[in-house]
């Protein structure tokens, strides 16, 4: 059962990550994408690990270290490397829309990886939410090769990060969020820096006020704060529920465009946004519909629902 703390943390992550797409877009205009992502996570790792060590948080054991290194690749380095690269080709809004398919992939991975099933109400809510997201930006679709390359990178990022979310729930739920996120960021920074040296050699960074501010926002809010809350939530609720954040972030991006940039908001977009929020509410409350996991009956030696 979700509590008020869960909802506050969930909404905070949605608001922050709904704003990161535009910040990434600003940053990769001046700085090569892989280098941008590497800097973001290197600085975030320094902050998180510094806080964790100052508070004497417990270090992971050997199996947890192995899981964190894997997640450094699968949760951070590969998805965000692809996302930063994709945003040099397609709009931030379209990136957010494509990434919003994450809950459906999480729902596909969960039964195979954890033995848990996703309630029908949650699956229906995800499908409705995905349809609402599509309606929000239907006129932004393009079939050009340039778009397809960027869009394909985002879809691959979604699949990898969805698998990583379920893997993290299974393997590192007992690791402190500051320590877990900090180690993953450090691993991903090394990987992304290496990739940048190989693939972006000779490309210059043109730092300006906008790119510096964008990097600062991505480090402090998009990484340190949001990921700490994300991993705290991951230990508390189901991965498919947490994955609905990607349904909300495009709505946040649209709302910010209307409020801050005075962009027009057609009635269709308002209706679609309302549909998305209702579907997310249904998914978050779906745990009450029935059993979510399977367990072995120690008396009969058989699998039963609980």
Image (cartoon, rainbow, N blue to C red):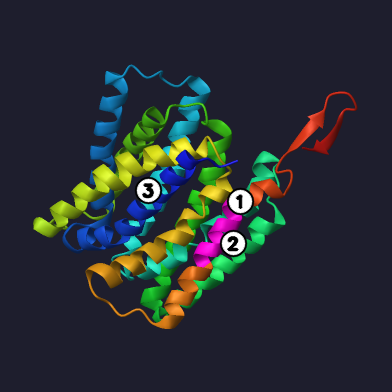
Left/right of residue 201 with respect to residue 242 in the rendered view: left
Q: Main secondary structure of the magenta part?
A: helix
Residue named by callout 3: 12
Task: Please state, as top left, top right, bottom left or bottom right, where the N terminus lies in the image.
Answer: top right
- In this picture, which residue range is highlighted in magenta? 276-284
Label 1 vs 3, first from the N-terminus: 3
Cα separation between marks 3 and 2: 20 Å
Residue at left 61%, top 66%? 127
Residue at left 34%, top 65%? 253
Which label lies toward us, 1 or 2? 1
**Residue 172 magenta-drawn?**
no
Q: Secondary structure at mark 2?
A: helix
Task: Please state, as top left, top right, bottom left or bottom right, where the C terminus lies in the image.
Answer: top right
**Residue 283 magenta-drawn?**
yes
Residue 23 in the image, given as x and y percentages of width and height: 25, 58
Q: Secondary structure at mark 3?
A: helix
Residue 156 in the image, given as x and y percentages of width and height: 48, 59
- Could you say which is closer to the camera, residue 146 or residue 60? 60
- Quarter of the image for residue 128 reads bottom right
Residue 236 seen anywhere in this rendered image of the structure: yes
Above or below — where is 178 with respect to 279?
A: above
Which label sits on residue 81? none
Residue named by callout 2: 126
């Amino acid at each position: 059962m979700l509590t008020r703390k869960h909802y506050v943390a969930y909404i905070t992550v949605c608001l922050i990550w709904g704003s990161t797409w535009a910040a990434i877009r600003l940053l990769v205009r001046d700085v090569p994408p892989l280098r941008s992502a590497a800097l973001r996570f290197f600085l975030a790792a320094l902050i998180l690990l510094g806080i964790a060590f100052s508070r004497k948080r417990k270090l992971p054991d050997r199996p947890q270290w192995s899981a964190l290194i894997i997640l450094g690749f699968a949760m951070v380095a590969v998805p965000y490397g692809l996302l930063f690269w994709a945003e040099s080709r397609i709009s931030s809004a379209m990136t957010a829309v494509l990434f919003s398919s994450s809950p459906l992939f999480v729902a596909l991975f969960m039964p195979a990886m954890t033995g848990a099933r996703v309630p029908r109400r949650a699956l229906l809510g995800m499908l409705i939410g995905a349809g609402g997201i599509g309606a929000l930006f239907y006129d932004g679709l393009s079939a050009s090769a340039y778009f397809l390359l960027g869009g394909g990178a985002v879809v691959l990022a979604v699949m990898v990060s969805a698998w990583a979310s379920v893997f993290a729930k299974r393997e590192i739920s007992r690791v402190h969020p500051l320590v877990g996120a900090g180690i993953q960021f450090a691993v991903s920074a090394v990987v992304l820096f290496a990739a940048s040296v190989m693939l972006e050699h000779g490309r210059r960074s043109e730092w300006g006020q906008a790119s510096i501010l964008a990097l600062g926002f991505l480090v402090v809010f998009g990484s340190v704060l949001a990921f700490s809350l994300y991993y705290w939530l991951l230990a508390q609720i189901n991965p498919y529920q947490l994955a609905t954040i990607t349904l909300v972030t495009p709505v946040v991006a649209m709302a910010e465009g209307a409020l801050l940039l005075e962009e027009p908001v057609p009635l269709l977009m308002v209706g679609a946004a309302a549909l998305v929020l209702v579907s997310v509410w249904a998914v978050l409350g779906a745990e009450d519909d029935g059993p979510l996991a399977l367990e072995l009956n120690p008396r009969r030696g058989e699998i039963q629902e609980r």
